[in-house]
Image: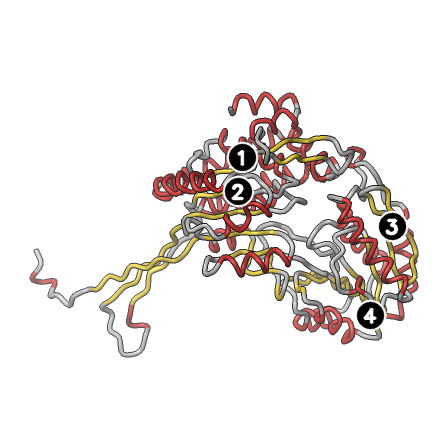
Amino acid sequence: MPEKFLSNLTDGSYRIAAELHQGDDEHSLEVRSPVDGSLVGKMHEFSHDEIDKVFYLTSLGQVDWANSPIDERARILHRVADNLEKYADALTEVLVMEVAKATKDARDEVLRSADFVRHTAEEAKHLVGEAQFSDAFARHNRNKMAISYRVPLGMVLAIPPFNYPINLGLSKIAPALVGGNAVVLKPPSQGSVACAMLAELLWHSGVPHDVFALVTGRGSRIGDYLVQHPAVSMISFTGSTEVGRDLANKAGMVPLLLELGGKDAAIVLSDADLQAAADHIVAGAFAYAGQRCTAVKRVLCSEEVADELVELLGRRIATLAVGDPRDNATVTPLVDPAAAERALSLVDDAVSKGAELLGGGGRRGNLVEPTLLDHVTEEMDVAWVEPFAPVLPVLRVVNAAEAVRISNASEYGLQAALFTRDVDVATQICMRLDVGTVQVNGKTARGPDHFPFLGTKSSGMGVQGVRYSIEAMTRIKAMVINMSDRDLSEIH
């Protein structure tokens, strides 16, 4: 199977590669391209019995994997990274057609993933335990020593989203594997072909079949069964807040890493470099048609400079390339028609309540035009609801305090961007914003991938980033040595 897969990669045929996991039964899942509606692949939908077998086999394989040297696991991950680069063109092709990502962005996802896997492999070697004596605590003598070290949790269920199936798949898989866990990957329906190719690449690189497994199918059919399976020791999920909340309720006491929705605000104060702010905001809001949890989802701008900033934003938005991802367009079709309908319903609601539509607002199939809304108020849904689309609302604020209040009033708390030349003001605002990360004079973004990445409130649970992810997917185990008070002169 690896040989067939590799020949398919060399030929650049994502359709043939998808047939490696093709299902012939009545529950097969067809994956069609948001770009032109063509069939990208036909994936097998696993039954509950098949899922049980997968968990049984990987649970057995995990024992030997956990006992293997960390250096050996790291070497395998380095081979994974090498093969990601080697077959980047074919993986790029499937991403372009399956999730409508521009060619340059799809290739960047693959290469960034290779960098992530390499960094993860090396970081695992630097995770060390500690030793401490008992006499540091009151009324204890130096007669005990605790040695702590990290051990795997066991079985990690990895669930990435459609928008970054390879990168966010590997951001879960690599830390879990190098930490000694087995991994079951449940890809999104739209993104399952890319994940099938990724699975073949992992196996070909030396990851044992009984340590890493792929389970495909609609979340509505197998999602609950997976997250509630007794073999699962930990779940790492990226997706909507609604699904994440439901998953958390059903998973019980299983440890969770949840990366959920966001309504990231770009706060622009009157002393900001408006040219730079406009560049960062447009890039942050419209790259990949805004289908990113860290996309700039609203602008909170000081009234003193709002007219100038809005004009700058409008000029930049007008130059964005819109259309086919194969032509490296910035704004490409959304994942499905429902996503486009939801986005435009927010635009229509805002306009009906007095917002000014300065550009966009139209739709061609799944493609939503880059849309700029000015004079948006807190009474409009677009001020609070995540569009996951190329829609940017501008709210005018009287001062920094009002900007902080509106930002914090959101149910989400992923990131915020702050544009100001005053480092003192920046520091004070950062301390008051209830988000995981504040980007000062830059757009909201996930990386670099060794930085901590987290959200507050409905934006997630736990901390990601190379070292943080490895720590989340392992646990501390302690060994206490009780020492007797012996006379060494009597020991020969």
Coordinates of residue 383 in the picture (x, y in percent) = 79, 64
- Mark 3: give few (<14), some (14-19) or many (20+) Cα within 10 Å: many
Identify the image quadrant of the C terminus.
bottom left
Do the numbered discs 4 and 3 sit on residues whose CB atoms are within 8 Å?
Answer: no
Tag 1: amino acid = Ala
Q: Which mark is residue 379?
A: 4
- Mark 4: give few (<14), some (14-19) or many (20+) Cα within 10 Å: few
- The Cα atoms of the two marked residues, 4 and 3, are separated by 25 Å
Tag 4: amino acid = Glu
Q: Which residue is mark 3?
A: 317
The front one of 459 and 318 is 459
Residue shown at 63%/61% (left/top)? Answer: 459
The front one of 412 and 30 is 30
Say which element carries label 3: helix
Residue shown at 42%/39% (left/top)? Answer: 53
Coordinates of residue 142 in the picture (x, y in percent) = 25, 70
Q: Which residue is mark 2?
A: 185
- The mark that comes first in sequence, 4 or 2, is 2
Between circles 4 and 3, the one closer to the viewer is 4
Tag 3: amino acid = Ile
Coordinates of residue 410 in the picture (x, y in percent) = 71, 68
- The mark that comes first in sequence, 3 or 1, is 1
Q: Is residue 271 visible?
A: no
Say which element carries label 4: loop
Q: Relative to 398, does residue 380 appear above or below in the rendering?
A: above
Between circles 3 and 1, the one closer to the viewer is 1
State left or right for residue 372 relative to residue 123.
Answer: right
- Mark 1: give few (<14), some (14-19) or many (20+) Cα within 10 Å: some
State left or right for residue 439 relative to residue 172.
Answer: right
Q: Which residue is mark 1?
A: 199
Tag 2: amino acid = Leu
